[in-house]
Amino acid sequence: MMLRALQKVFRKLTYAILALCASVVVFAFAVWLPNISLIVKVMGHPGISFSQKLNLPISLLSSIVTNFTPLSASYTIAVAVLFGVNLAMMVYYLRRKIDEVAQSGITTGFFGIVSGVVGMGCAACGSFLLTSILSLFGASWILSFLPLGGGEFGVLGVILLSVSIYLIAKQIQNPAVCKI
Amino acid sequence: MEENIQTNQKNTLAMPIAVVIAGVLIAGAVIYGGGKTPSNNRATAPQQQPVQAEQTGNLEQMKQISASDHIRGDLNAPVKIVEYSDTECPFCKRFHDTMQQVMSEYGKSGKVAWVYRHFPLTQLHSKAPKEAEATECASELGGQEKFWAYVDRLFAVTPSNNNLDPAELPKIAQYVGLDINKFNTCLSSGKYAKHIEDDVQNAQATGGNGTPWSIVISKSGKKYPLSGAQPYATVKQLIELALQEK
């Protein structure tokens, strides 16, 4: 059922491109996040050539190898890919059945995205966003008690996004007819 | 029928509410995350400044580099990389190798100097502050040469993630050729605890919220923040950018 739904969606090149672009954006966001200020500084520097401005963020992408643990790199990539797939499937379904949105699937998807995003970060020194969010409530000490230091939210993001994809796939496979 | 309408209305609301909650959380985290550090044990009020302005202003609070710093290379090198490091952070261990690669390419020609400062993340690595003190004791007993030998050896042998046995610290001292008795006396005195804490405060003041936290300073004095164990290619690009500045 899942495979048929995926085939239905991704046989159209538009959705494959949408999924790919969305995945790349999420992946780049996750990897660039610790050095956003550096990227902004370099991009805004008048004395740096365009090719140098382009090379720096591209080279920063390979920090997925140096600045992530194997687990955090895995769920970062998984969240990025699943986000792209989820988004493409949501757009496909919404375009096909604009009046009958499967709220449970889409809501699960958004919570999956939130969970995945907050779980990202430099795994050795705590999730960047999660630390910030918990600090809003004066509760950043909680991270030190979690076995994966906040990485649990990245794993949870993968699970929720997968569930969302499954639910949307089910809806896509439902025939657009009234059941007798 | 009426029940279905109400259910549909609730369902209609669920999605936008989920989107709004997600957006608020992420926006709040990105804005608020600029001034937060995992090592900060004090209670602090939420900050409202935009992340970008805050981090730019913080870099200027970096303590000036002086002869009293731990410097590898020429103090008068046109580009300096100030690294705030935690001896138990596995990413600092990786970045230490990267910086050694930097120094083998740029240090010998006097183009880059590496300045090492302490940023032990006590909440994650309770042993790190004492290890930082141990490196200072190595410096006291044997000068810069022994300091760097000690730091290199410590990063080479530590399993990271707070797993180094404290009994190894005097063994490392012996390995690099220091007097064990004097080393142990120095370490147990705690005389360098304040110096370590001063470095931690400075790291936080410059916007550091994790380790390794580095600041690349060009010959014009412009500062570039570099967070995390970035690959050699990235550091090299940044060095080249800093070198070409007039």
Image (cartoon, coloured by chain):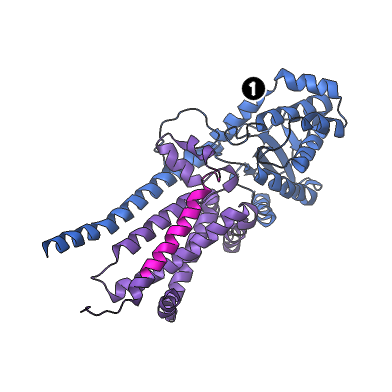
Chain colours: A purple, B blue
Measured as percent of width and height from the top left, residue A71 is found at 59, 54
Asked whether residue B57 is in view, the answer is yes
Q: Residue furthest front?
A: A180
Q: In this view of the protein, which residue sits in the foreground, B22 or A52?
A: B22
Q: Is disc 1 surrounded by few (<14), some (14 to 19) or many (20+) residues within 10 Å?
A: few
Residue bearing the label numbered 1 = B194
- Residue at 42% x, 58% y is A160
Q: Main secondary structure of the magenta part?
A: helix
Left or right, residue A46 beside residue B133: left
Q: Is residue A47 visible?
A: no
- Magenta-tinted stretch: A147-168
Q: Quadrant of residue B7?
A: bottom left
The residue shown at (53%, 57%) is A76
Closer to us: B32 or B143: B32
Q: Quadrant of residue B73 in the image? A: top right
**Residue in view at x 75 percent, y 23 percent:** B187
Question: Which corner quadrant of the image does residue B79 belong to?
Answer: top right
